[in-house]
Amino acid sequence: MFYSHFLHKERPVSDVPLSIKIFLLISLVLQLFWHSVQEPVVAKAEDLPPPLSTRAYVMSSLGEPIAVSKFLNLWLQAFDNQPGASISFHQLNYPRITEWLDTILALDPRGHYPMLVAARVYGSIKNPEKQRIMTEYIFHKFNENPNKYWRWLAHAIITAKHEIKDNVLALKYADALAEKASGKNVPYWAKDMKIIVLEDMGEVEAAKILVGALIDSGEITDPYELNFLTQKIAALEKKVLEKQQSVER
Amino acid sequence: MKKMLSQALTISRFTVIESLRNRLLLLSFLIIGISFAMVEFIGDLAITEHRVTQVAILAAFLRMSAVVMLTLFVVSSTVRELNDKTLEMILAMPIRRGTYYLGKLAGYFSVAVIIAVIFAALLLLYADAEQVSIWAVSLFFELVLVVALSLVMLFTFSQVPAALTAVFIIYGAARIVTSIFLMAKYPIVAHTSVAQQFMDAFIELLTWLLPDLHRFTRTEWLTYNTADWSLLLPLFGQTVVYLIFLSFIALFDFYRKNF
């Protein structure tokens, strides 16, 4: 029995002095206590710092701009996704968000993630002033490269008409889309977005037409994006239904 | 020549056996498991560009993991040979120092191939097979340089902390030196001071002395399918040139060492 001590690489737990075991437990309890008295971590929207230069991100990621761009997408998104921070959409500094979106696009110019969040995450809040900042950002990016970013301007048109309720702004975007997006990849219906603006069409119908047309033209291929947009439409439908029911009552 | 080759192959074989006994293979699979869990979690967070987001973060993580793992293995295993006097025992036999170095290098390259293949296998779940193959070959080239650099630093410093620090600093510098050079060359505010000009010249010197690692194992190949096999030719050229350079630095130090 005694010799077994030397046959194994490690001695049995009973060989450890009692004081060490007790202090190990105490130190574990101390760590748990320390954690319990710390302030809980919550999303602080006003803490969104200004972005660094793109080169700083390239260097800090050891030359991985695309990976850091994707990571920043998720990090920026997490500012609003954290529990208990649903009101932070309104607290966020929107001009600063556009700086972040620009930085992320500069790190990965082929990506569309920042445009989706501009159009459908930050552009969906109930604050016309902030929504206008996002649609103007999309319009600005569209003017830089109309054939690449046209579909985001199509989303902005619907936001301008139905959420900001500014028909003049929606028409301005629809005109720009018809005039500047001339690439072969731009479907014919996109140039006719004026119809959606001018017709007396509900927000849900307009959004459904847009998403359906984007799927038909092969612009939406990512199942997660499709799922996200479908959920958005379902939420809109629910909202419209609730509104109708309250009017009927 | 035949005898030298046979000796080198024996040393190489034992290096691979050591990697297996060090549970390096097991560690690789552990990293694969952690990466898989991480990337699936990331996939749930992304609302669009789901695959691209997963691939970009996974590729960068696997690349860094491969570099760190292999550096730690090369440095720790060679230090162990120095401390256990195994190296002295080998050199007491009719084996040239150059043969020993060649054998170790070949053994570590075999380990690098295994790591590159295991890591690339996970990427096959998320990216195009041809692009993953090109990425894996490029990762192997990068790991070849990391192995050679680790041996140089170990022969120079003979201490684990110093050797590891030097490898990671030089590796990091090789990855970002082009960005630093561009920043220095096109400053926002023009500078004319002597100190600044000295720094600019020093950075330019680094671009000449360090391998162009930012061209290796690029994530965009996997995310946007931009690579073709011809891309590997200049990478192969850079790997061969720098491997020869590092090998002669290592041999220079190794032949000067007294045991």
Image (spheres, coloured by chain):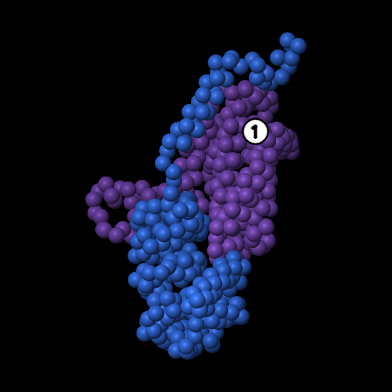
Chain colours: A blue, B purple
**Residue pushed farthest front?**
A249
- Identify which residue is drawn at 28% across, 50% down: B196
- Residue A35: horizontal and vertical position, in percent? 46, 36
Residue A41 makes an appearance in the image: yes
The three-letter amino acid code for the residue at tag 1 is Tyr
Q: What is the chain identity of the residue bearing mark 1?
A: B
- Identify which residue is drawn at 59% across, 68% down: A227
Assess disc 1: are there few (<14), some (14-19) or many (≥20) residues with their C-alpha within 10 Å of its C-alpha.
many
- Identify which residue is drawn at 36% across, 53% down: A47
Q: Which residue is mark 1?
A: B100
- Residue B91: horizontal and vertical position, in percent? 64, 26
- Residue A152: horizontal and vertical position, in percent? 47, 75
Residue A185 makes an appearance in the image: no
Q: Quadrant of residue B224?
A: bottom right
Q: Secondary structure at mark 1?
A: helix
* Quadrant of the image containing the N terminus of chain A: top right
Q: Nearest the camera: A147 or B227?
A: A147
Q: Horizontal placement of B197 versus B5: left or right? A: left
Q: Looking at the picture, does residue A197 appear above or below residue A26?
A: below
Q: Horizontal placement of B110 versus B225: left or right? A: right
Q: Nearest the camera: A65 or B17?
A: A65
Q: Quadrant of residue B87?
A: top right
Q: How many marks?
A: 1
- Residue B65: horizontal and vertical position, in percent? 57, 45
